[in-house]
Amino acid sequence: MYSERINALPPYLFAAIDESKAKVKAKGFDVIDLGIGDPDLPTHPHIVKAMCEAVKDPKTHRYPSHNGLYVFRKAAADWCERYKGVKLDPESEILTLIGSKEAVAHIPLAFVNPGDVVLYTDPGYPVYKIGTLFAGGEPYPLPLKAENNFLPDLDAIPADILKRAKLFFFNYPNNPTAAVADMAFFEKVVRFCKKNEIIAVHDNAYCQVVFDGYKAPSFLAAEGAMDIGIELYSHSKTYNMTGWRIGFAAGNKALIKGLDKVKSNIDSGTFDAIQLAGAAAMNESQACVTETNEVYRKRRDILIKGLKSMGLEAKPQKATFYIWAPVPKGYTSIEFTETLLEKAGIVATPGVGFGAAGEGFIRFALTQPVERLKEAVERMKKLQF
C-alpha cells in the first residue's frame, strides 16, 4: 500500500514513545513524562495578548505570504543583530517558518539529488535523517562521543563520502546531548564546508535556553558562514510556543531562496496573527526568557543531584532543558527506559533512538515541575539498579 519512501522510514521516535506511554497509563499507572521536549510552562502572557489582538483583525484571516510578513522578518533580523551580533537583510536573508522542523524536512528537497550524501550529527534530531530519506539522499551519521565533548570529528569522514556530500546538519546547543560548541568549532565547520563545497545547516533551536551565564553563539557570526550557511531558529523552546508552529531561517540569500521555492510550492505560509505574536515575542522584553531559564535551572540542579545520588554521573549542562545521562551497567538504553516506564512510571528517551552513537545514554527532559522531578528521583531510587 505505502510508497517505497514511506516503507524505508524508521518508526518516528516520539510516536513510538507515546504508544508505550499510553499502554502504561491504561494500566492505571501515574506516569511522569520526561520524554519529549515539550515545555510544560505556558506561552508568556504578552505574546498571547498580541495574538488575541491580531486574530481580531480580518486582515490576518486571508492566505499569508509564503515567505512571511515583513514585520516578522524585520523583527527576526533585529533580534539576530541584538542578541547574536549578526546583521541580516529581512527581505532576502530571513524566511518565516512553520516551526524549524519543517525547514529541516524541506531543506534536503531544495538541495539534495538522489544519491547525494547528507552529513548529520549522531545522536541527533531524527528529522535530519528522515528529511534526507524523503529527498532520496543518503544519510551519513557523524558520531558524537563524550571524549570529544560531543563534537563531530570532521577529519574522520572518508574521502569518497566527502565527494558526494551536499549538506551538513549540525545542532549546538545540542539535542539530545546538551553539548555546546564555541566559535572555534563553527569556524572549523566553515573551512570544512567551503573546502568540500557543502551547505552548512545549523539547527539553533535551543540557543536561548541557557544557564550559568552562558551565551550560545550564532554559527552565522563565524567568518565566512554567510557564504555557505543557513541557520534555523525556533520560537518553540525560547518562548514556550511549541504548538504555535513559528520560527525562521536566516543566512545565505541563495539558500534562503531555495528553501522558499520548496515552501511556496508545498505550504501556504504561517498564519499572519501567529507571525505578529512571534514578532512581539522578539521585539519586547526578554525578561520572560530569563525567568523561564531560571525555572529550568532549578529543575536541572534537582535532577542532576538525584541522578548522582544513584551513581549516574550526569553533568549539569550549560544549555537546553535536557539531561544526557549514562545508563547503569548491564542495561542498554532501551532496556533502561523500559525499566523506568514499566516499574517506575517514568518516561525518558533512549539515547539509541537518536542514532546508534546514542547507545549507552538516556535523555531526560526537564518539562515537569520540581515536585514531580523529586518524585521521579524517589521512584528511581527504589529500583536499586
Image (cartoon, rainbow, N blue to C red):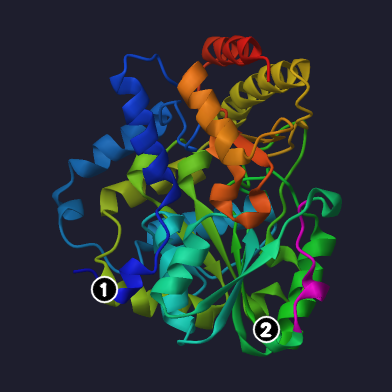
Give 47 or 235, whichever is nearer the viewer: 235
Residue 84's place in the image compared with 15, above or below, is below
User: Where, by quadrant of the figure, is residue 200 drawn?
Assistant: bottom right
Quadrant the C terminus occupies: top right
Q: Main secondary structure of the magenta part?
A: loop
Q: Residue at x 32, y 32 (%)?
A: 49
> Element type at marker 2?
helix
Query: In the rendered structure, does residue 65 fall within the stretch colored magenta?
Result: no
Visible residue check, residue 209: no
Between discs 2 and 1, the one toward the N terminus: 1
Give 339 or 227, whichever is nearer the viewer: 339
For mark 2, does the 10 Å Cα neighbourhood hold few (<14), some (14 to 19), or many (20 or more) residues? some
> Tag on residue 193?
none
Q: Residue at x 47, y 32 (%)?
A: 39
Read off the residue under disc 1. 3
Residue 311's place in the image compared with 70, above or below, is above
Foreground disc of the pair 2, 1? 1
Q: Position of residue 181 (x, y in %)?
A: 77, 54
Region rendered in magenta: 150-158
Amino acid type at circle 2 is Ile
Q: In this image, 98 relative to 210: left or right?
A: left
Q: Position of residue 262 (x, y in %)?
A: 35, 77
> Tag on residue 161?
2
Q: Position of residue 337 (x, y in %)?
A: 55, 32
Q: In this image, 96 relative to 283: left or right?
A: left
Residue 383's place in the image compared with 319, above or below, is above
Give 2 or 90, whichever is nearer the viewer: 2
Q: Residue at x 53, y 78 (%)?
A: 138
